[in-house]
Amino acid sequence: MTTVDRALDHAHDDHHDVPYLTGKGGPIATVWDWMTTVDHKKIGVMYLFTVLFMFFLGGVAALMLRIELFEPTRQTAAGITGAAFAGGEGSSVGGVGKFYNTVMTLHGAIMVFMFIVPGIPASLGNFFLPLQLGAKDVAFPRLNLASWYVYVFGSFFGVYVILTGGIDTGWTFYTPYSTSTEGQPQVVAMILAVFILGFSSIFTGLNFIVTVHKLRAPGMGWFDMPLFIWAIYATSIIQVLATPVIGVTFLLMLFERLFQIGIFDPGLGGDPVLYQHFFWFYSHPVVYVMILPAMGIISEVLAVHSRKRLFGYRAIAFSSLAIAAVSFLVWGHHMFTSQGELAATIFSALTFLVAIPTAVKVFNWIATLYKGSIALTTPMLYALQFLFLFSIGGLTGLPLGALSTDLHLHDSYFVVAHFHYVMFGGTVIAFLAGIHHWWPKMFGRMYNEFWAKIASGLVFVGFNVTFFTQFFLGTQGMPRRYASYVDEFTTLHQISTVGSFVLALGFVVHLFVFIHSLIVGERAGQNPWGGLTLEWETDPIPLEHNFRHEPIVKHGPYDFESVVPPGCDEKDFPLPPQDEVRTVH
Amino acid sequence: MATIDTRASGLTKQEPLWKRYVPGHHWRTQDDEFDAAKIGIWLFLATEVLLFSGMFCAYAVFRMLYPEAIAAGSGYLDWRFGGINTVVLLISSFTIAMAIRNVQLNQQKWATINLSITWLCAAGFLAIKFIFEYGPKWAEGKRIGNLFSYPYASTDHEHIWWSIYYMATGVHAAHVLIGMGLIAWLIYRQRKGAYGPTHYTMMEGVGLYWHIVDLVWIFLFPLLYLVH
């Protein structure tokens, strides 16, 4: 191929030099512009709102579960929600149990497939990955828009399932229950939803990998990339390599449901354990799709808000890749009881490997804070919460990975508490840190710091009250997925339910803070936190083509001791005396 | 992006489309765009391999669980039809590779011929599959899942063999069908002069896709037809 070099800034029409949020004439033209945009920033914002809407739906389902669990039997719940939770005592399937199972399935399926998997990469990743690389867009902009439409199309099936009565299979769709439970159209629709959402996930992941390879700004080598990008890169590898497996699994499941092909259904000679292997070969790596981008956000927030070079840059970067690699070897720890002892032992041993790169990250983050100039902004508060909560989540994973203790703890509330500490205490808390950290860049306005901190306190207290109690419930023998329980668990369940409403209140305050900021928030300026990564070199609200001139990278992403942040005054961000600075790079 | 920017290359509308091609606004050079597209396609091929790996895995598991059902089922297949189809696909892989070489050398007429042969081979593959394989078997009741009604099955789990057979070859046939659509699009665009020595990204991408479709069949053929 011959090379056709073009002048970079040739023929840029004036209309590209406006902030990306500026409308296009009338409201219809603006809506049409957003619906057909290939701008990664607009797609990121659209993803952010759709994903948060799904979080709302899943959250409502979670609150319904907590209301139901307020009492061993369901008098109060039946009083509040009407006939839905009422019904005969003790029936596990059908009647009252059926409704509980349905709400539980919707909570799990929506939160996993429609909120937390696409969550950070598709929203914040979409917006900031090209900006941090100094690129004008992702590698395949139209594929990016297609990914959003596919996501909406897939979620549409999920919402259809909710509106028509839901399914009660649990989010894992284990056979033979999922192939035999009533509600044919709903089960098929939900399987189809997950199948379609997989394409969206692959599109995004593929796009990001190619973008990182081919669109880094001049001067940006692999080890000059911000760690958020390393995390998204590792995430994308998992998305591309794991998602096709759930695709073929749910394709077979679809035919199992429609034509009884007998591959998974033991009644027809099929192998349900094969289903479990397939399912977890995707669904375990995807746990790291959920947490890795969160770790990327934490790296950014901790460095910027403590004005400190990240300790162990390469160790954090490589640990992301290590987690991605190990993630494919540990699926069997979800199936300790359905496989042989030797296999279970091997999977248990491999599971402990995950702790190594994860701990490398945590230690490096803490070392970063040492002697930093820590600003307790909302993003920083959330990042500190993450360190605390994620460590609890990670450490409680060890007794679950060890065969002997897992024998007692599996399928109990201990497991529920563990993965909520990782998924909520880890991912959602980091997502909140990221939203607050990048909010000024996304919308050009500051949020109210005081009320945001109040909200973050409510979230922290509410979350711990809700889920720390569940560790006790689990060790005392409360099994997960049950609608009723024996009386001695009542107190702990009631504390947990109260906590869940404090948590919900925290989110309501956050919602008002965001709305307030969008309407009357103070103008943010180019670089309110004094960050050094390239997204802070853009205008207060980035232009449609991101940068006024293609950026050339001359310093590392975390060289706080030697570089005055772009768009900032040295008075506000004084550099330390240069003779004290160790020149390490 | 949609409008062709003739200022960049200084070429007029009399020139063929491939000479007037201008990469997307976010690319520094056309080479970068081409490389990116190629990485993208290779990643996509990786997802395809993983998609089919599920089918191969199911095949292996049921071969272990019910060897007699798999052996009996395999015995119903005629290796000659599978063999012909293998040859047909191999020829098509060769011709699409040749077509890419043709546009690189700007031999537009030969490119059309080679692409057309590729398309015809794909159609031939599906014709053989449906007329000589799916059709007669379906008529005898050797069908998928709960539609299975073959009265002379020699083992209990023969319906599982047919499920795997139809799922694996069916998903593969769907890929062939999608490939036919893509190749038809290539012929249409190539006739308009869209591809030439400096721009043939779409040809390269579809070519790689077509090779993986071929490659999957290379594994399906011995596993389903030859091994008993």
Image (tube, coloured by chain):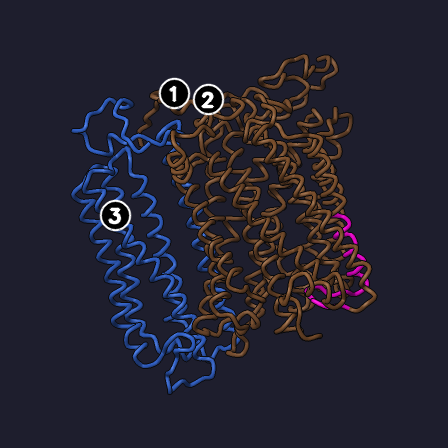
Chain A visual colour: brown
Asked whether disc 1 touches disc 2, contact meaning CB atoms under 8 Å apart, the reply is: yes
User: Could you tell me residue A55's position as x and y percent?
Assistant: 59, 49
Chain B visual colour: blue
Q: Are marks 1 and 2 on the same chain?
A: yes
- Inspect the image, locate mark 2, and give the three-letter code of the amino acid beneath it: Glu
User: Could you tell me residue B177's position as x and y percent?
Assistant: 30, 58
User: Could you tell me residue B174's position as x and y percent?
Assistant: 34, 60
Residue that mark 3 sits on: B185
Measure how far apart labels 1 and 3 are at the Cα level: 33 Å
- Inspect the image, locate mark 1, and give the three-letter code of the amino acid beneath it: Asp
User: Could you tell me residue A126's position as x and y percent?
Assistant: 51, 37
Residue that mark 1 sits on: A9
Question: To which quarter of the image does residue A367 belong?
Answer: top right
Q: Could you tell me which secondary element the residue under label 1 belongs to?
A: loop
Q: Nearer the viewer, residue A462 or A295?
A: A462
Q: Is A473 colored magenta in this rendering?
A: yes
The quarter of the image holding the C terminus of chain B is bottom left
Label located before the other in sequence (1 or 2): 1
Measure how far apart labels 1 and 2 are at the Cα level: 8 Å
Can residue A366 be seen in the rendering of this structure?
yes
Q: Name the chain letter of the residue that bears numbered label 1.
A: A
Residue that mark 2 sits on: A550
Q: Could you tell me which secondary element the residue under label 3 belongs to?
A: helix
